[in-house]
Image (tube, helix red, strand yellow):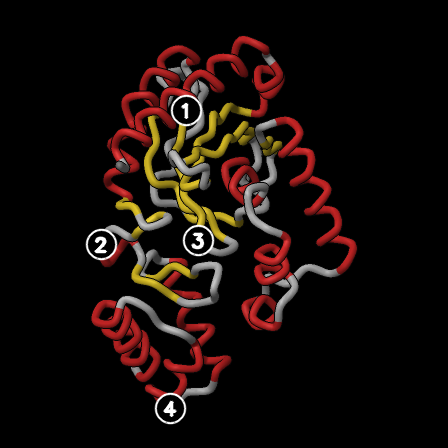
Amino acid sequence: MASVDNALRLIQILRDTGELRVSTASNELGMAVSTVHRLLAMLVYHGFAIRDDSKAYLPGPALGAVPVMGHSLKTVRNACLPHLELLSGYLNETVTLHFRVGSKVRFLDAVESTAVLRIGSQRGVILDARSASGGKALLAEASLQTLERLYRSRAAEIAGEALNDADFEKLLRQLEQVRRDGYARNFQETAAGVCAIGMSLHSRDGNAIASFSVAVPAERSTYLFDEKLLALTREARRDMEAALAEALT
């Protein structure tokens, strides 16, 4: 019961203050830092909190809409959804919209394919950004300093997200490839049988504020190399960025 009580108190602090750091929570609740980390990690998993690049925790979607680069999630979703629907209709594959907070990517919305063999919507799912195609696309936009903070810092060690030298260098190479290609791919890295291509979405000032992906069953993974699919996906990105530029002014 003590753990439940402490978790609820953390939720109340997040709701009332809008931001929480581990040291503050530790002092407020009189708990060890490691215990606070575990509780906050559980809140993140269930959507009550999100962790930003500065290592602060913010209210998660379960407590209401959270900002993406200072913008409402609802605004971003409403601007992109018609274009996601069109792209899904053209390709008859599942298309999803995501945003990144820290080392995680959350699936904000999805338009599911009508094919018998298809990928489910995964709306609300939280995944490691370095595995999901949409997460990789957004990490490729991050600075080296941000990546080091996410995967090489003391906070990353405590959270269990730290990478060793070899794995961090591998991640940097993957992200460099994403930047060269203009998109990221995921071949069953997040779940068996799921393959996807992801692209980031930018605001008028060039900041990456969200990403989207086209997800296909592994049996159709070669479709992700199809030039028509890539062309339609790039066109959808242009249309969504134009819609975001208008919606976020």
Q: Give the CA distance from mark 3 to mark 2.
A: 15 Å
Chain-order first, disc 3 or disc 1? 1
Chain-order first, disc 1 or disc 2? 2
Chain-order first, disc 3 or disc 4? 4
Contact (Cβ within 8 Å) of mark 2 with mark 4: no
Chain-order first, disc 2 or disc 4? 4
Mark closer to the observer (3, 4): 3
Residue 85 locus on image (x, y percent): 31, 20
Q: Is residue 165 above or below residue 216?
A: below
* Residue 155 vs residue 9, the one in the foreground: 155
Numbered label attached to residue 101: 3
Assess disc 4: are there few (<14), some (14-19) or many (≥20) residues with their C-alpha within 10 Å of its C-alpha.
few
Q: What residue sits right under mark 4 in the picture? A: 30
SS label for mark 2: loop
Q: What residue sits right under mark 1 in the picture? A: 94
Q: What residue sits right under mark 2 in the picture? A: 64
Which kind of residue does numbered mark 1 sit on? Thr
SS label for mark 1: strand
Assess disc 3: are there few (<14), some (14-19) or many (≥20) residues with their C-alpha within 10 Å of its C-alpha.
some
Residue at image point 35% right, 48% down: 68
Q: Along the horizontal axis of the image, is 53 left or right of 76?
A: right
Residue at image point 59% right, 12% down: 226
Residue at image point 60% right, 55% down: 147
Chain-order first, disc 3 or disc 2? 2
Which kind of residue does numbered mark 4 sit on? Gly
* Residue 43 vs residue 76, the one in the foreground: 76
- The quadrant in which the N terminus is found is bottom left
Q: Is residue 85 above or below residue 13?
A: above
